[in-house]
Structure formats: C-alpha cells, structure tokens
Amino acid sequence: MMTAESLPHWDLTNVYPGLESEEFKAAVARAKAQLDDLDDYLATHQISGEGQVPQEPTTAAEKLGGYLDRMNEILRLVSTLQSYIGSFVSTDSYNTLARRLMSEMEPMLVRAERQEVQFGSWIGLVAQAGPSVFQAALALEGPAREHAFYLAETAEQSRYLMSEAEEALAAELSMSGIRAWNKLQGVVTTQLKVPFEREGQTTELPITVLQTLRTDPDEAIRRRAYQAELAAWESVREPLAACMNGVKGTVATLNRRRGRTDALHAALDKARIDRDTLEAMLGAMVDSFPAFRRYFQAKAAFLGKETLAWWDLFAPVGQSEKRYAYAEAQDFILEQFGTFSGRLVSLVRRAFDQNWIDAEPRDGKRGGAFCMRVPGVDESRILCNFDGSLDLVSTLAHELGHAYHIECQVGKPSLQCRTPMTLAETASIFNQTIITDALLARTSDVGEELAILEGFLSDAAQVIVDIYSRYLFEGEVFERRAAAELSADDFCEIMIRAQKESYGDGLDWRYLHPYMWAWKPHYYRTDLSFYNFPYAFGLLFGLGLYAIYQERGATFLTDYDELLRSTGEGTVADLAARFGLDIRQRSFWEGSLQLIEQRIERYRAL
C-alpha cells in the first residue's frame, strides 16, 4: 500500500488564490451584479409568465438573445464559484469557512433558478400563444438559433411549473429545507469514524477509508470491515432517515404540485429519454441476471465458498491482489489511452501534471468519486479515494472520461453543455472499456486475465445488478413516502428486499447491506431523483459505441468527439441515431449485455 503522503490533493489556485482572497470576493460581487442586471432585464422587457408575447420574430429573437447571453455569463461564473467552494467542502467537511460560503452562495443559486423559471414561464406563454413567431425567431441567425434545442425544451417543460410566486417560494424555502437535508447527510457521512483493529492496533478510521478495505485480499479483514461499517451506519441511521424523508417528501410534494405523473416522470425528462426506452433497457437487464448470478457463483467457488457474502463482492481474484502505486496508475492509464486518442492522452497528462485530482482518503472527505466542471478556467477537478486496487485505477480512468467529455465542450455556452445523466457516463464508460480491452488483448497469463475480467465484471455487476436494486428501492420509497414518513427500519427492509430481487441466489441473503441507502449521496440529490438507471444506460450505451469504434477504427474519433460536444443539444434518441443506434429497441440493450455475458462465460471457464 502506498503512503498517504504520496497521494495528491487537487490544486485550484489558478481559479482563485483562496477563499478569503480579494479575487474571490470580487468574483462573488461580480456574480451578484450579473444577477441584478438580469433581474432588471427581465423586468424591463416584461419577460414573465404574465408578460407580453412578441408579435414579430425579430423582437422575440432579440429578447431571447438578451436573456441567453446574460444567463450564460451568470452560469459560467456562478458554477465556477460553486465548484471552487465545493472543492473545500467535499474534501474537508470540518472547514467551517467553506461551509459558510457555500451557504452564502445558495441565495445566488436560488436567484438563478428563479430567473430561469421566470424565463421558462414566458417561453411557454410565447410558444403557446404565438407558435409561429416563436419558431420564426429560432430560425433567425443569432443566440436564439444557436440555443434552439434549449429553448424548445424549456418551452415544453414549462408545462410542469407552478406559478412564478410558488416556484420562487419553493426555491427560497429549499435553502432551509431540502438543501439543508442534503448538506446534513453530507456532513454526517463524511465525519463518521470507526474504530478498527488491524495487526494488533486499533485506530479510528474515517468511514471512507474503512470502505476501501472491501478490496483487501484477507477475508477476515473484509468481513470485519463490513461488520464495522454496518455498526457505524446503525449509529447514525436516525438522522440519515430524517434526511431521506425530508428530501423525498419535498420532491414528491413539488412533483405533485407541478403536475408530474410521478417522481420518475421528471427524471426521465431530465435524462431526455422516454418510458419505453427505460422499460426496454430494464427488461434486458433483468433477463441478464441469471448470467450475473453465474458470475457470482463462479467467484464464490474461486474463493472456496458456496455463496458470496456482501463483503466478498469486491474481493480480489487472480493477480488483482497487486496494489498500484499512484505513479504506476498514472503511467498505466496514459499508456492505455495512447492506443485510442492523442487528444485524450494530452488531457489526461494535464490532469496529472497540474494536480486536478484529489486522491487521498481522509477524515472529512466524502466517499466515492466524481468529476466536476470548473468553467472559469475551462478545466475539471476529480475526487476519488485511491487505495491502489485495480478497481480504483479503473475508477480513476472513469472519472478522467468525464474530464474528457468536459474538454470536448470547451468554448460552448453553459446552456449548451447541460448533459443528461444518461449521456454523462458515455466517455467514462468508454475509458474503462479501453483499459479493459487493451489489458485482455496483451495478456497471456491466466491469473492476470482472470484479474482483468474480475475488475470488469465486478464493475458491470454494480452497474447492472446493484443499480437495479437501487432503482427498485427508490421507486418504493417514493411510493410509500407519499402516504407517510418511513422509519430507518423501513428503509433497511426496502433495501434488503430490493437486493434480494436483484442479486437472487448470487449472494448469501444472511449478509446483504441494509444501509446502502444511508451513505449513497445519489438518494439525497435535491435536483435529480433516480440517479441510478443512468449508470446502467451509460455502461450499455458506451459498450454499444465501443463496438462501433472497433469496426470503424480511427475514423470513429471525429464523430465521437462531436457527440460528446453535442450532448447538451439533443435528445438521447436523436444523438444515438447519428451512429445508427435505436435505443428504443430492446435488441440494442441485449447486444451490449451479450458482450458482458461473453466475458462472464470466459471468467467461468478460467
């Protein structure tokens, strides 16, 4: 294992020198001035749900352009400030200054949301009362035509808005309501520490560090870490249950008041897919579960067990017991990406050389991994909790895929970069597939091949099997939360039942994970429910694209980069059609799953 000192922390000093710097304070003041200016613009031009409908396309286009230019400027600056402050909060929840500044940022975020709602109400009015004028305005050269997809989508989604006064009130109340629940969950889960004995010494480990022991080659350590983790979540389950009730209850209420069919309705619209597409994908996933259960059973046999326990899910198999030094992981990733794209390698080298990555697990740092956009400098920053395992090497490559996606969108206005979660995983899954395929192609050692397949299948099982359990869990929580609050026992019972349905006889039902709901931040998102199925979508869509890359070779790269650049400017079905893919057909999803099943059979043969 590498030492903590060898793992980098990210550097954002090229954004602002510090949270108390004059540059940062000036940026905050500039953001407030921009918000004031847009408020004045909206009022002057009577842009609201009760405003005037332009009678001429030119007038409409001018009003649209004035809003678009101002909102793009606001989003670029406010998002930069949010990412900058968030870089401190996500890596040190004890930083009271950062937490206070994030709280001070929230009114600005709420103002921008309110302005978008006000504009959306007006766009809906214009599109309904003067459709010919609206369409003609989108055809005129200028910002309106460049943002035609955003404007049409905004007009369509305006059907699901409450009155402007109600939306404004909901946004303001969110600061002391739903957003507060989200922040509490983050603080509780990042500051949780667990006593753990190893080699005769007991130390208090941050929960994020404890969770890295799931890949330890020693089953006794994995089992004790699992037991210690469950006990830790048990100790904080009541506040986390309150957080879940607060978030889901608020979302359900707002969905009802906005005329949504259900919580999934809004999630599908944000994902830019329809129910038929989701059902086709989920149906194909469920049909693949017997193959995944064969994988679990084969892994159990390799470990000398009849059935896998939860703590065995990430157990190393083959030569994956090898631990990578961080520098070794860098070289490995750069080498593999070099087989695909010079542009990708250049981006990844910048990320490593310029300290875009925070890799050290530590107290106060949130678990998991993510990549965030920093628009003001046209860069990204990546958080992970690196433990030297092949799984975390793959995770790092995954997050670098998000950074590459962001790189492909550099230069585009913020409103054209709003990528649905379904497509947000495309480049990340593609990166992981590059690494896996390259490794499999060059190895002739059975133990190494087994380790590579284990890494791929372990990830795939999480994204297909476990994600389905999360989807079932969230669906039932929303359904039952509409009637009454749920207890911590209720959440655990729903989670266990969902895991049993997904994993089936692939796992030992005595040892599941009833507290997966407690620590997964996705459930506590205030702006996006069902942040689960997009992962499965991303894996299967990415594998489908990779198959096309294998057929076309280098000629694929230009279209691939253009797809990533355009993910904020079309429905998923339309963008997929550029590659001849029909995501509404179950056969597409079955084709991608067959690639996984082939690797399962190879794994079993080894």
Image (cartoon, grey):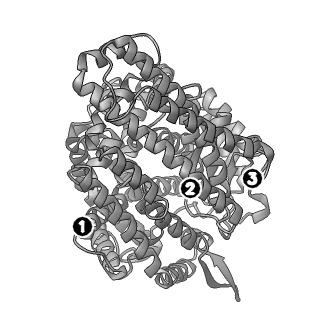
Q: Nearer the viewer, residue 73 or 298?
A: 73
User: According to the image, label 1 marks what residue?
Assistant: 482
The residue type indicated by label 1 comes to Ala
User: According to the image, label 2 marks what residue?
Assistant: 369
Residue at the image position 37 percent from the left and 55 percent from the top: 532
| Place of residue 144 in the rendered image (x, y in percent of width and height, measured from the top left) | 42, 19
Residue furthest to the bottom = 200
| Place of residue 72 in the rendered image (x, y in percent of width and height, measured from the top left) | 53, 31
Q: Nearer the viewer, residue 398 or 493?
A: 493
Residue at the image position 60 percent from the left and 52 percent from the top: 105
| Place of residue 93 in the rendered image (x, y in percent of width and height, measured from the top left) | 64, 66
Secondary structure found at label 3? loop
The residue type indicated by label 2 comes to Ala
Query: Distance from label 3 to label 2 (Cα)?
Result: 23 Å
Question: Would you call the spot at circle 1 few (<14 residues within 10 Å), some (14-19), or many (20 or more)?
Answer: some
Q: Nearer the viewer, residue 14 or 339?
A: 14
Q: Is residue 79 above or below residue 148?
A: below
Secondary structure found at label 1? loop
Please state which of the two labelled residues, at mark 3 or mark 2, is closer to the viewer.
3
